[in-house]
Amino acid sequence: MRQPGDAAPRTGLAARVDALLGRPVEYAAAALVLLEVLVLLAGIVARSLGHPLVWSDELATMLFLWLAMLGAVVALRRDEHMRMSALVARARQVWRARLQALSLGASLALLLFVAWPAWQFAHNQQIITTPAMGLSDLWRAAAMPVGIVLMALFALLRLLRECTPRRAVGALALPLLAGLALWWARPGFESLGQLDLLIFLVGIGAGCVLAGIPIAFSFGLAAFSYLALSTQTPLQILVGRMDEGMSHLILLAVPLFVFLGLLIEMTGMARAMVDFLAGLLGHVGGGLSYVLVGAMYLVSGISGSKAADMAAIAPALFPEMQRLGTPKGELLALLAATGAQTETVPPSLVLITIGSVTGVSISALFTGGLLPALVTGLGLCVVIGWRNRRRAGGGAARRERVSRAEVLRLGLVAAPALALPFVIRAAVVDGIATATEVSTLGIVYATAIGLLVYRRFDWRRLVPMLVETASLSGAILFIIGTATAIAWGLTQSGFSGSLAQAMASLPGGGPVFLAVSIPLFVLLGSVLEGIPAMVLFGPLLFPIAQQLGINEIHYAMVVVLSMGLGLFMPPLGVGYYAACAIGRVAPEEGVRPLLGYLAALLAGIVVVAAVPWLSTGFLAR
């Protein structure tokens, strides 16, 4: 994102072309968000009437990849892809401008590198026919090359608008020359074995992140470098893994919950909820911070996506918390921490994945996940209380106490809004809608409440909200896509098998195995996310834990919480950057306040690991 003090964008032909092409792309992305809502809603209605639409999920999946890629295009055009700019912001203005140009050049270089493999991948998909609609998969897969070419075009236009011609040429030439130099050294890399992982996935990936290159493009450069320079893998495989990571239908909940969050704010539901909660707890120092912890515990897992959970909660609470004086960095840190804290709250997609790949009872995992999340949540509340006692003598983020009658009135006004999480959860539990579809019911409910109860629905804001939804979702999903490519690279390197052998040979039995598992899964969570990590390592490590006498439910809670900690830990944790995007806060603002919450979460994980009863106490005997 552009930093204060940077040179203003240049006007001219590039700006006019950008404006001419940008508006149709934004409208197309907005239309796709709305179309996804209508398709999923039609599927719910038809199924409830006994006439299911067998093609609805197929069409939703096909449209979803287009939404993700066009959303990523809009995010690049608007400079809304997340980046770690702490070092860039501290540089002198001239160097900041150079690094901004390098960021654009590196992003453009990646897009140019993968444009042809993306077309090859899409072309190969044309022989696949969708089962319900009988369409060639090319219609879906074409979103990858089209999106990549459009991103490259808008990156070039931004480079021409924001930089002098000399700086623009240098910004593009530097990564291209670096790529040629690495290609020349390729024979040496092929003989290094798994040391390449350290050079490419850690060195290049982390180096690009710290240099201010957007997170998604940093991950993409790392994965591309590793596959191109140290393996014989065809590069279209990289695009295929990105496609796989961005095409999971469960991730469709991300844009739909983002849009739901914007609707909650626009229709007045957020104001009604915040007024009631602030009246109830606002006189307590940091009261709304406790509300944020409880709200995330309540809605977590409904959507199957942690990013979607955060997107449903943050817009309702952040504006009022900021008005009461809570720093933006603190808000970001707490949102990320609650995302990690609630990883074991059912119905968690990670727990379902564990059950499916290891044979552990999913119902037992759901039962065992409630108390561990409560323990880590109490740890966060301790940090909240301590910080609010220190901040301004305990007077920060505090309202005057309101009367009980006023609290009751505010509660009645807020009741339709407060019912939304229960409506959503009931729809999932009763089988009315899947975890992917349920957000559409929330959208219908919020629209009806806004129109009929609160009488607030600004139709003029609808298109900008849809465009904002597409941009934010594209930024998040493109990170997930490139992170999936990195995960695949780790798999093909043989790293997973080597790790399992090393874990099995540890001395000290079960306690040492648990102690090593915590930092191991923190690291895996920061690189792979929960589901890929469980698919890779669950079948390998759970049998070892069982042989050492560790209850499988207990072990599952420890590793899921540890992965959650890694998922939201900078500089690599993808979940942290999703929280940054949802909260609209620069990543560097949340790092320092996040440390205290991470320490509390780590302490909670240690407690859960040391006390198996917290995970197994309520299991049926």
Image (cartoon, grey):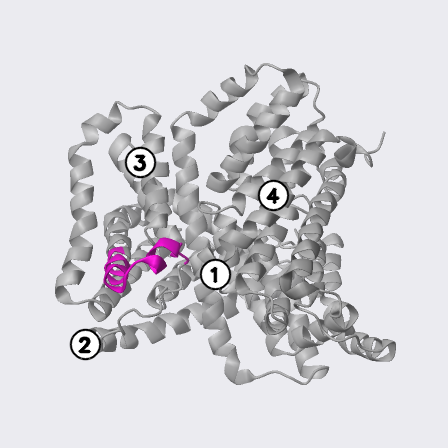
Callout 2 secondary element: helix
Q: Which circle's residue, 4 or 3, is located before the other in the chain?
A: 3
Q: Residue type at mark 2: give it.
A: Leu
Is residue 54 something that shows in the picture? no
User: Which is the main secondary structure of the residues drawn in magenta?
Assistant: helix
Q: Which circle's residue, 1 or 4, is located before the other in the chain?
A: 1
- Mark 3 sits on what residue? 226
Question: What residue is at 43 percent from the left and 65 percent from the top?
Answer: 471
Q: Residue type at mark 3: give it.
A: Tyr
Q: Residue type at mark 1: give it.
A: Ser
- Mark 4 sits on what residue? 599
Q: Which circle's residue, 2 or 3, is located before the other in the chain?
A: 2
For marks 4 and 2, give the CA distance: 52 Å
Left or right: 430, with 318 as reference point: right
Q: Give the range drawn in magenta.
A: 82-102
Disc 2 + disc 3, Cβ < 8 Å: no
Residue 417: name its quadrant: bottom right
Residue 306: horizontal and vertical position, in percent? 58, 52
- Mark 1 sits on what residue? 473
In this rendering, which labeled residue sits more in front, label 1 or label 4? 4
Give 261 or 603, whichever is nearer the viewer.
Answer: 603
Q: State the mark number for residue 13.
A: 2
